[in-house]
Amino acid sequence: MRALSLPLDLLAWLGRQGTRAVAISALLGLVLPQLSALFRPLVEEAIFVLLVLAFLRVDPVAVVAHMRRPRLVALALSWMLIAVPVMVGLVLHATGLIALHPDIALAAFIATAAPPIMAAPAFIALIGLDGALSLALVGGGMLLTPLAAPLIGAFLIGEVLPIDAVALGIRLTALLAASAGLATLIRRLAGSVRVAAAKEHVDGLNVLILFVFAVAVMDGVAARFLETPFFTLGIAALTFVVALTQMGVTLLVFGRVRRDHAFVLAHAAGNRNMGLLVAALGGTLPDLAWLYFGLGQLPIYLLPWLLKPVATRLAANQASRDAGHAGPDKTS
C-alpha cells in the first residue's frame, strides 16, 4: 500500500503547487529541447486528457446552468471569435504591417481567431475561479470555430485558408463528446464524492500533462534563441503584450459583469488554442509564425501564476458581495 500511496501523495503535492508548478513546466520546456522529439507525437493525446480532466474538475450541473443562461457565453464568444480578430485585422491592414511581413497576418490569425485553450478550465480551477463558466466557453468556442475561423482567415490573409469547416466541426464535436463521455464514465464508476475528494490528484495530473504539451510545442524554440537571442526575446515579449491586451480590453468590454466572471472571460480571450488552428493548417507554419506559436505558450503557462493574486482578490470580493446582497445575479 505504501508503494501505491507514495506516487499518489506526490501527485497531490504537485497539484497543491498549482499555477507555480505549471509556470515551471513551461520554463522546463524551453531548457529540455531534447525531449521535444519524444513528446511531440503526444500533443493530441495530451489535449484529450486535459479536456477529460477539465470535465472531471468542474461540476456538470454548474456547466448546464451556464448553458441554460447562454447570453453571457454567447456574447463572450462573439467578442472573442469575431470582434477581436476583425479589429486586429483592420489595424494590421491600416498600418501596412501585413504587406511588410505576410507571416504577421498568419500569426495574428492563430492568436486571435482560435477558441480558448482546452486547458482553460484546468487553469481557472488552479486559480480558484469558476471552472464551469470556462468549460462552457471552451465547448461553445470549439463548436463555433469551424464557422468563424475560415471567414476570419480569409479577411486577415486575403485568401481562403485550407480549413475544411465540416471536417473540422466533426472532429471538434467528436473530441468534445468523447472527452465528456469518458469523464462521465469515470465519475459514475468512481462516484462524485470520490472524484471531488481527488481534486488535488486531478490538479497534479493537469500539471504533468501540461508539462508534456509545453515541451512538445517548444520544439525548435531553444535553437532559435541561440541563433537570434534578441529577436526571440522580442517575439516572446510580444506574445505577452498580445495576451494581456486581449485580457485587458475584454475586462473593459465586460465591465458590468461580476468581476470574477469577467476575469474568466478575459482569461479565455487572452489564452487561445493556437494549436487547433495550426493542426487545421496541416501542422506547418512559416518560421516566424511557428516561433510565435511556440513562444505563445509562455503567457498561457505563466500568466495564471502571475495573475493568481488578482483572481483571488476578485473571488474574495465577489464572495463578500454575495454574502451581503441576497438574490440572483442579474449580470450573468
Image (cartoon, rainbow, N blue to C red):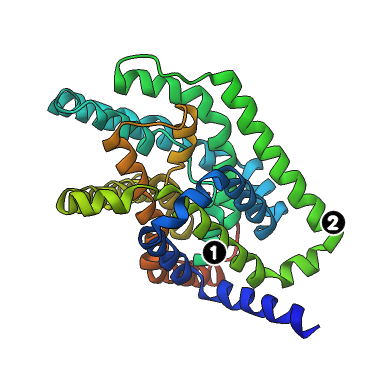
Q: Is residue 67 left or right of residue 91?
A: right
Which residue occupies the foreground of this view, 173 or 256?
Answer: 173
User: 44 above or below 34?
Assistant: above
Query: In the figure, is residue 138 to the left or right of 153?
Result: right
Give left or right: position of 332 versus 308. Answer: right
**At which x and y percent is residue 258?**
46, 56
Q: At numbered mark 1, what does the secondary structure look like: helix, strand or loop?
A: helix
For label 1, the crowd category at 10 Å Cα-Cα, with few meaning under 14, some 14 to 19 and many 20 or more, is many
* Residue 182 visible (yes or no): yes
Residue 91: x and y in percent read 20, 30
Residue ranking furthest to the top? 159
In the picture, the disc for residue 188 is 2
Q: Earlier in the sequence, mark 1 or mark 2?
A: 2
Q: Tell whether 253 sits left or right of 163.
A: left
> Residue 293 at x, y = what percent?
36, 42
Label 2 neighbour load within 10 Å: few <14, some 14-19, many 20+: few
Q: Which mark is drawn over residue 207?
A: 1
Residue at image position (39%, 71%) is 309
Quarter-of-image position of residue 94: top left
| Residue at the image position 72 percent from the left and 53 percent from the top | 61
Q: Residue at x 51, y 75 (%)?
A: 17
Residue 113 drawn at (x, y percent): 40, 33
Amino acid under label 2? Arg
Work out which quarter of the rendered image holds the N terminus and state it. bottom right
Identity of the residue drawn at 54% across and 67% down:
322
Image quarter of residue 325: bottom right
Outermost residue to the right: 189
